[in-house]
Amino acid sequence: MKLLTSLLVALGLATSAVFAGSSKVPDINHQDLQAAIKAKAVTLLDVNGTDSFQEGRIPGAIDYTAHKAKIAALLPKDKNALVVAYCGNEYCSAYLAAATAAMELGYKNVKHYSPGIDGWKKSGAKVEKG
């Protein structure tokens, strides 16, 4: 019984740690993201995988899956620059890998576009392919 209780407590702590990590990444809404893209004031990290990246991405996005080993070289020098990570949709948490990588490199303005590429496409916004 003590073992079961210990396991449940450990599971609860692990779950809390995961959710605590996601709360560190605030969301950016569609209008603010579009404005940042128009102003060329954002670095976008797409974590959907290279095949999905080729099929359609938010314009200007970096394929995080293909470039994660050299992501530090692809991010802006300004650690206060806006960095936005996104994945497929609001149910996906893969964005946390890219967001966490940026934060660990010292970026202070890291956000999440929760609608993901699905929401971007549904809005009718422009998509890059290839």
Image: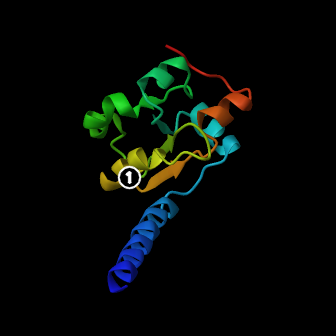
Task: Identify the residue at image location x=51%, y=63%.
Answer: 23
* Residue 75 x %, y %: 36, 38
Q: Residue furthest bottom?
A: 2
Q: Nearer the viewer, residue 84 or 12?
A: 12
Residue drawn at x 44%, y 73% as measured from the top left: 12
Report which residue position mark 1 lands on. 100
Amino acid type for the residue under numbered disc 1:
Thr
Q: How is the rendered protein coloured?
A: rainbow
Residue 28: x %, y % from top left: 61, 49
Q: Outermost residue, right direction?
A: 123
Question: Image height check: is 124 above or below 75?
Answer: above
- Label 1 environment density (alpha carbons within 10 Å; few <14, some 14–19, many ≥20): some
Q: Position of residue 94 (x, y in %)?
A: 46, 44
Judge by depth and name the residue closer to the eye, 70 or 107: 70
Q: Nearer the viewer, residue 119 or 111?
A: 119
> Percent x, y for residue 38?
61, 31
Q: Nearer the viewer, residue 92 or 74?
A: 92
The residue shown at (47%, 51%) is 110
Q: Is residue 95 left or right of residue 1?
A: right
Residue located 36% across and 75% down the image = 7
> Could you tell me which secondary element the residue under label 1 belongs to?
helix
Q: Is residue 95 left or right of residue 125?
A: left
Q: Residue furthest top?
A: 130
Say which quadrant the N terminus sits in: bottom left
Does 90 sit above or below residue 108? Answer: above
Extreme-front residue of the structure: 1
Above/below status of 109 relative to 48: below
Relative to 34, 25 lies left or right: left
